[in-house]
Image: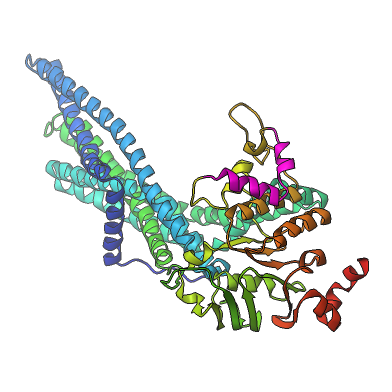
């Protein structure tokens, strides 16, 4: 069962509001001043306008009754009322622009900080459900944060409107203010109860929304549509999506419906209060104890006071929900960044050593790697082989510093990898994994340049990368060559559409990106699974001919690994064999058994 969020204390409310104001002021200081001034102007001017409108009505009645001076007063009051109306409209236009500017600046500051923090977390957190839940809740707050100060401004406006309205009513008769206060209390209680229930429902259904979003994302990926159609699963997923949507949105609407009778009762109570006030002022006017304009004055002031109270309750209940989510955001932002050492490289290590490394993922106790020891010498070509699930990809994550060993060490010469900054280590690596990224929003040229954006584009490195990945031929055939978009969902300014690439072409593009990086250590995890065997053989012939780089390869293809200087065979997280291809074949052990069919084909 989902844990219910605790209600905020008064102190927490004050602290949270102060933090919102501080963050907003840092992003848009002038907007804060304008918004606060606007809250006062927006709440006071309409009441002042009502006052002069009431005086106008009284003056007109007096003029109609024969008072010769009343006509001039009526005209003066009309002019003042009109001027006040223009001022209100002009201010609202300015305020709308300022509010939009403030929301943009605050949203930019919030989302930039949040995304940067998300990308700097310890790598294990991306596999952690609790972190994913925390991120979803924090993201919801970040999305609404730019609007919170707007709500605070509206809250201030409604509070001033309510206070000024009550004060104006008390000046007429003290009990008019009292009945308005008594009439709005039930609405406050009901609205707060509803907002708490709404917040709890949202937090209880984080996984439901995540599942629905995943279905929607998969259904709109072009490369997935073929399987959805062939397996006739699209309708099933649409139905599943609908059920998840109903669980989230329909249930929320259902419990909101349960509040309708209580809301109606509160509205009736407010209506009774307004009618009572109007009956009282009508009786007063009939007995000539109040001027005729007082009816309009009381009617408008009561209406504004009740409207201000209703808006106050609505904004307060929404802020109550948003500020409760603030603590989810703060909890997420307090998660520690990836911790590494403070050291850096003076020169490339002559040897990389995995020394008695064992590892299990943070959310499990099952060891994926068990007492693994591997030595990789500078400029050596290493192959890591084994059946699926043997721990090969996990070993690469340890080697690249994405995960730290549960026990054991990764040494760069005599230096523990944990003492080196992760950024310094990653600068030495070019890594192409099975799940490589396809930047469909960019051109082919940019897809390759993304291999090293720390320096200006280098044409010589670019051309070398194209040759080594055997990507030049198919890229030059694209509508705009290497400057073509590599997705048919993209279009150039002149109307030329982008081109889709095959799986093998995407893989060569990813290889070219890796080669463009021009790093001293290259790690390839099943890098050519979609490339034909002959092209793969040529690519690795060039790769292994380069004796100035350390190459670490994971592959199931014998032609890829047989030329490696050293091969490590993994089974169930352990190194069971190591040696050259000929040595391992001669042993007739696990390596020979795994590649026996490919050996016969040769």
Q: Is residue 112 left or right of residue 486?
A: left
Q: Choose between 399 and 223: the one closer to the eye.
A: 399
Q: Position of residue 403 (x, y in %)?
A: 55, 73
Residue at x 46% of width, y 56% of height: 115
Residue at x 12% of width, y 31% of height: 288
Q: Name the outermost residue toward the right.
A: 600
Point out the image quarter for the N terminus.
Answer: bottom right
Q: Determine which quarter of the picture holds residue 478.
A: top right
Q: Determine which quarter of the picture holds residue 390.
A: bottom right
Q: Is residue 322 left or right of residue 550?
A: left
Q: Choose between 334 and 323: the one closer to the eye.
A: 334
Q: Is residue 597 magenta?
A: no
Q: Choose between 550 and 210: the one closer to the eye.
A: 550
Residue 286 seen anywhere in this rendered image of the structure? no
Q: Position of residue 171 (x, y in %)?
A: 12, 42
Residue at x 38% of width, y 60% of height: 326
Q: Which residues are magenta?
A: 457-479
Does residue 338 sit above or below 218 in this rendering? Answer: below
Q: Position of residue 205 (x, y in %)?
A: 55, 62
Point out the image quarter for the C terminus.
Answer: bottom right
Q: Is residue 162 left or right of residue 146?
A: left
Q: Choose between 304 and 230: the one closer to the eye.
A: 230
Does residue 562 sit above or below 309 in this rendering? Answer: below
Residue 105 seen anywhere in this rendered image of the structure? yes
Residue at x 71% of width, y 61% of height: 545
Does residue 464 sit above or below 577 in this rendering? Answer: above
Q: Is residue 591 left or right of residue 317?
A: right
Report how many numbered discs are placed on residues in the image.
Answer: 0
Does residue 119 sit above or below 461 in this rendering? Answer: below
Would you say the magenta stretch is mainly helix, strand or loop? helix
Q: Position of residue 40 (x, y in %)?
A: 21, 41
């Amino acid at each position: 069962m989902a844990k219910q969020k605790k209600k905020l204390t008064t102190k927490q409310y004050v602290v949270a509001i102060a933090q919102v104001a501080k963050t907003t002021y840092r992003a848009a200081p002038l907007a804060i001043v304008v918004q606060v001034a606007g809250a006062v102007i927006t709440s006071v001017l309409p009441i002042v306008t009502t006052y002069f409108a009431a005086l106008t009505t009284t003056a007109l009645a007096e003029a109609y009754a024969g008072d010769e001076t009343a006509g001039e007063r009526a005209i003066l009051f009309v002019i003042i009322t009109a001027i006040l109306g223009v001022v209100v409209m002009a201010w609202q236009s300015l305020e709308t622009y300022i509010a939009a500017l403030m929301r943009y600046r605050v949203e930019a500051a919030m989302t930039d900080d949040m995304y940067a923090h998300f990308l700097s977390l310890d790598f294990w957190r991306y596999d952690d459900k609790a972190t994913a839940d925390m991120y979803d809740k924090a993201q919801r707050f970040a999305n609404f944060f730019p609007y919170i100060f707007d709500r605070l401004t509206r809250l201030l406006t409604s509070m001033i409107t309510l206070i000024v309205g009550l004060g104006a009513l008390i000046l007429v008769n003290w009990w008019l203010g009292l009945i308005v206060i008594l009439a709005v209390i039930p609405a406050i209680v009901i609205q707060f109860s509803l907002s708490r229930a709404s917040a709890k429902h949202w937090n209880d259904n984080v996984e439901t929304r995540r599942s629905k979003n995943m279905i929607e994302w998969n259904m709109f990926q072009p490369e997935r549509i073929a399987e959805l159609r062939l397996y006739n699963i699209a309708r099933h997923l649409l139905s599943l999506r609908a059920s998840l949507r109903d669980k989230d949105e329909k249930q929320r609407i259902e419990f909101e419906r349960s509040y309708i009778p209580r809301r109606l009762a509160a509205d009736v109570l407010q209506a009774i209060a307004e009618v009572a006030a109007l009956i009282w002022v009508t009786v007063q006017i009939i007995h000539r104890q109040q001027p005729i304009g007082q009816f309009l004055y009381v009617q408008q002031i009561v209406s504004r006071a009740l409207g201000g109270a209703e808006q106050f309750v609505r904004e307060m209940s929404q802020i109550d929900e948003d500020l409760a989510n603030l603590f989810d955001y703060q909890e997420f932002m307090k998660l520690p960044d990836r911790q590494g050492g403070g050291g850096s490289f003076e020169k490339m290590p002559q040897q990389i050593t995995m020394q008695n490394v064992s590892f299990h993922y943070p959310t499990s106790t099952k060891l994926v790697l068990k007492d693994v020891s591997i030595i990789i010498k500078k400029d050596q070509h290493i192959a890591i082989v084994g059946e699926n699930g043997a721990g090969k990809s996990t070993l690469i994550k340890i080697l690249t510093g994405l995960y730290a060993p549960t026990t054991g060490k990764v040494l760069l010469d005599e230096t523990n990898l944990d003492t080196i900054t992760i950024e310094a280590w990653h600068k030495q690596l070019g890594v192409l994994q099975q799940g490589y990224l396809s930047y469909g929003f960019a051109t082919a040229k940019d897809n390759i340049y993304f291999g090293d954006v720390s320096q200006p584009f280098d044409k010589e490195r670019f051309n070398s990368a194209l040759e080594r990945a055997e990507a030049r031929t198919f890229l030059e055939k694209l509508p705009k060559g290497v400057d073509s978009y590599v997705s048919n969902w993209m279009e150039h300014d002149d109307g030329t559409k982008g081109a889709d690439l095959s799986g093998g072409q995407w893989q060569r593009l990813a290889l070219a990106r890796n080669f463009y990086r021009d790093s001293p250590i290259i790690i390839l995890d099943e890098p050519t699974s979609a490339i034909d065997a002959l092209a793969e053989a040529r690519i690795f012939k060039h790769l292994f001919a380069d004796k100035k780089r350390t190459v670490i390869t994971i592959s199931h293809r014998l032609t890829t690994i047989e030329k490696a200087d050293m091969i490590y065979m993994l089974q169930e997280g352990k190194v069971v064999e190591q040696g050259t291809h000929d040595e391992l074949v001669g042993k007739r052990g696990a390596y020979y058994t795994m590649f026996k069919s490919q050996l016969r084909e040769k």
